[in-house]
Amino acid sequence: MFARVSALLAILAVFGIAAAQEPQPVTPPAPVILYTDLVAGPVKGGENDLGAYVSIFGRNFGAAAAQAHVFFGTREAAAYRYFGPSKGLPDVQQITVQPGPVGAGSLSVSVVVNGVTSNVNHPFLVNPGNILFVDNVDGSDFRARANRPDRPWRHLQTADRGGALGAAAPGDVIVLRGKSQWSDLGFDDRWVRFWEETGTAPQGKAGTGYITIEAYPGEDVHYLAPAKSHGGIHGASTARAREAGQYVVVAGLRIESVATSTSDGAPINLQSSADEWRVVNNDLSWPNAAADSRAGGIAGNCNHCKLLGNKIHDVGGGTENHGIYLDGSEFGTESAVVAFNWIAGTHGGNGIQSYNAHVGGHTGPNTGLNMHGNRIEDGSRYGINLADGTRSAIVFDNTVTDTDYAGIRLNLDDQALDVDIYDNTVSNACRRENPVSGALINTASATSGVVIIRENTFTKGPQSTCSHGYTNDADDKALSFRANNWQGFDAPVSVK
């Protein structure tokens, strides 16, 4: 048989007739996990005794829920609660599951779609804890019981620090229902203010772990701050710094501050040293903030916090109201990760800002910052502003579009700078004329250490008023440029 087929192919070739090629199967792209909300939590208790709700975020999860299977180690999740878009970037999908009896220890999370397995570099630690439900329609703080969806608390926090948060311990998960809009005030005229409450590093045993505040899967948990209140969920003040409000997860909520929310009244304010917070997949806005509000969508300082996949939009107010504002206050910000956020419509401040005015005094600088995968658009100032007191950072794979000032501004005045800015895309920057214009600008004396700007693309847009891709308005001895693409802009005349 093989000889006959070979002879036929030879005859076809003589007459110049090509043999028909069989269509090759197209291999779909492998699923990719970008981040999760919980990295530790209970796998029993709560709804049907199947544990906490854990959300996985990524791409290529398929077009229907039946195509995707979530595994913790080698065991598949026991229950699937949500499949669909995330609250953040429109191309990021979300799957929410309850793990159930998946075992113990640290387990790799994976997603299998049509037989293809994702990356496995996102661990989940099985960590005991209770699950506390909160229902602002049918709940009662007096009748509530942990792990009983039918016996929910009424308040997340009360003015005297009662409610579900007052009953929570390290390792516990608080689940909010979205039956009706929330407008409660807890301690210190906020929805939540951490004061003595705190989580701890999860160790896989009772009495340790994050305190989690998350939305019930698929429900819109919408908090609208009452007039003249201080905003949404806030960390401890300077007086309680590093004594309370550590190891906290805030996930899946919609929080909106109002025009009369007072200074620092952001939807989420880390305040002083909110270390190890995970702020994931929230919808945050402050559309009519006052000019002196001094906060934004997410503000404050922290060590090792993760701000992942949030949609931050319609932030008004003055020039200190930013989409994400990593400040220094009395403490520096160390090793914060700001990734995969969608920041749109910051009409007062910058998209993302790192700033610590206390450097040189009794505080440390902002160091080890990691900003990547963010989409920043329609801003009235700078897209990304690395400002005073920022010492070390990597900034990569961000997209900045439609900003009134520069897409990226460097105002780095610290010593021993260590900054790497690469693979970012900036387009239609400097929509408004200003004294220092360019898609990328330097406005401080960056003379010590290294600031590398490499392999970025800067594209002039229809509203760009500037002609320079890069403008230096101070001293840029520490800056070096490599393989950047200046589309429509004048490239720097001399780059180091």
Image (cartoon, grey):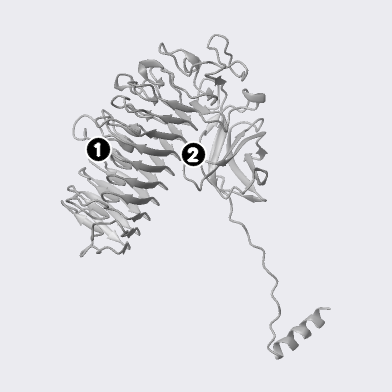
Report how far apart the C-alphas of labels 1 and 2 lie in the structure: 26 Å
Above or below, comparing residue 346 to residue 250 in the picture: below
Above or below, comparing residue 217 to residue 208 in the picture: below
**Residue 224 horizontal side relative to residue 173, left or right:** left
**Residue 168 horizontal side relative to residue 398, left or right:** right
Residue 216 x, y percent position in the rendering: 56, 28
Residue 416 x, y percent position in the rendering: 23, 45
Residue 23 x, y percent position in the rendering: 68, 69
Q: Quadrant of residue 294?
A: top left
| Residue that badge 2 annotates | 87
Look at 39% across and 24% down and name the residue there.
Answer: 225
Disc 2 marks a residue whose amino acid type is Lys
Look at 17% across and 48% down and name the residue there.
Answer: 445
Disc 1 marks a residue whose amino acid type is Thr
Instruction: Name the quarter where the N terminus is drawn.
Output: bottom right
The residue lying toward the viewer, choosing from 362 and 336, is: 336
Label 1 SS? loop
Residue 459 x, y percent position in the rendering: 33, 60
Label 2 SS? loop
Looking at this rendering, what residue extends furthest in the top direction? 142
Marker disc for residue 319: 1
**Mark 2, residues whose alpha carbon is within 10 Å: few (<14), some, or many (≥20)?**
many
